[in-house]
Amino acid sequence: MDKALEVEQASKRYRNGCGVDRVSLDVSKGEIYGLIGLNGAGKTTLMKMIVGLLRPDRGEIRIFGQRVTDRFEHAIRRVGCLIEAADAYEYLSAYDNLKLAARFYPDLPKSRIDEALERVGLAPYRKERVHGFSLGMKQRLGLASALLSEPQLALLDEPANGLDPEGMAYVRQTIRQLAREQGIAFLVSSHLIHDLERIADRVGIMHGGRMIRQGKVSELLKDGRSLEQFAVSQFQAAKEALAYA
Amino acid sequence: MHSYYAGTLNEMEKLWKRRAARSFLALAILIPTASALLTAFFRGGSGLLAGLGSDLPMRMLSLYTFALIPLFLFAAAADSFAGETAARTLKLMLVRPVARSKVYASKVTALAAGIALQLALVWIASTAAEWLVSGGDAAAGLRDSLIAYAAAFVPMTAIGLIAAFAAQGFASGAGAMSLMLVAYAAAKALPLAVPQISAWSVFSYTNWHVLWIGNGAPAPKLLNAFGLLVSYGLMAYAAGWMRFERKAL
């Protein structure tokens, strides 16, 4: 099984009419897939459907061949995610937050918690309550939590949110390294399109809940434009198409 | 099964690390002890305080099942469901390899464990305090009080399951707590205006344990009340589970 993630015609409609409309994508092992879109494009909704926080109205989602809706526990076992915001139990320490997550993986050694905190630079604060953490520290903790179980598929929604330049560089480097060396598949959404351009193998551009374009970064940018320029042109075209419709 | 066990450990740890829950547990020791000391202080007097000392475990049980355990349950359920939704921490467990049904079962199990722990602490503290302060035969009434405390677990669990269902309908922990308290007070007061309601209201059975003291109530009456409490509990569990399964985060 080469595909880590397969989304087929997934749809979700909220009461306000927004959501995701017949989106399909796939991510292979070791691939970094960037998700680009304006606010409300449906990126987070799509990610929530993939990890079972939202049930799709239609369509099918498979993780390593297992349907999320039918075999959730098996499907999600090899997934790590950071979705919407790096939320944590504020009354618990950084270590205890990860300990709660680690309990669901019986084969995970306890030392992995300290390794994860070390990796994101939170080891000196392991016993401190999250309540006193800055946004950047919470984001680092969220990343540690997402990568704690040594997942084979990682979903990161705005992973650089709240991070300083050093933190952003660290996130880029970590994603690239884990994808290349350990074959982890990444689905990463970000408004930092320059960052995505530097790390993503493929990107998907979403607008109004639909996937309006996807492909290899190298192929999409043949004419020398930056990914940001390309994405903005796609948004513009989608808006114009909607206006004419 | 492992994921249910892990979830239950997590829920208990979260409950334990909340200051409110630890305060409730501390009170479970302090209130019986203070009551026994007050009794000793006023021993020989007359009226209410003199009467406090007699059968302290049963008096404490009535106080706890009427007010303090329901209060604990509303606070814990509000925090575990509405509070976690508001703090956006509910998703932290739901994106792990554990089915929602097991997360819900874990949360409910933690509430039940909280009830059991409080009952155990109150029983131990009140029995020990009465024995130390009043002296006398330590074994006297022990069997009755033990049965009564065990019986009290049933209606308290039913109320806990109702709280777990109700708390999911609120957007904040504070809102859930306040409204559940008001609803509970109303449910307790309603039979005063409409006496027929007390026969089928689960909230009228918080003192169910008194039916078990001494020779106890006739078996059919006990069975009838037990059936009603279990039915309420099962309905509340099923409804709460369904609500939890459908929750969009």
Image (spheres, coloured by chain):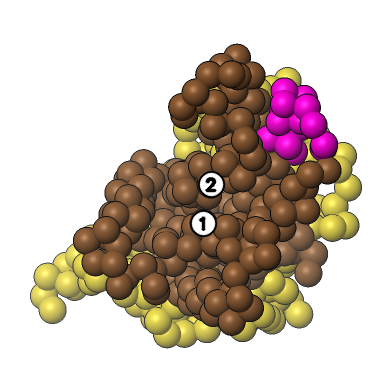
Chain colours: A yellow, B brown
The residue most toward the left is A244
Q: Main secondary structure of the magenta part?
A: helix
The residue shown at (12%, 70%) is A243
Residue B133: in magenta span:
yes
Q: Position of residue B90 (x, y in %)?
A: 52, 53
Q: Residue at x 29, y 54 (%)?
A: B189
Of residue B39 and residue A52, the one placed in the foreground of this image is B39
Tag 2 or tag 1, which sits nearer the N-term? Answer: 2
Amino acid type assigned to the residue bearing label 2 in the image: Ser
Q: Are marks 1 and 2 in contact (CB under 8 Å)?
A: yes
- Tell me the residue at 61%/45% (across/down): B58
Q: SS for tag 1? A: loop
Residue behind mark 1: B207
Up/down of B87 relative to A34, above or below? above
Q: Is residue B134 above or below residue A234?
A: above
Quadrant of the image occupied by residue B26: top right
Q: Please give the name of the residue rendered at 33% of the width and 44% of the height, measured from the top-left corner.
A: B178
Q: Nearer the viewer, residue B40 or A38?
A: B40
Q: Is residue B207 above or below residue A169?
A: below
Q: Range of the magenta residues?
A: B124-138
For disc 2, the chain is B
Residue A197 as seen in the image, left or right of residue B200 = right
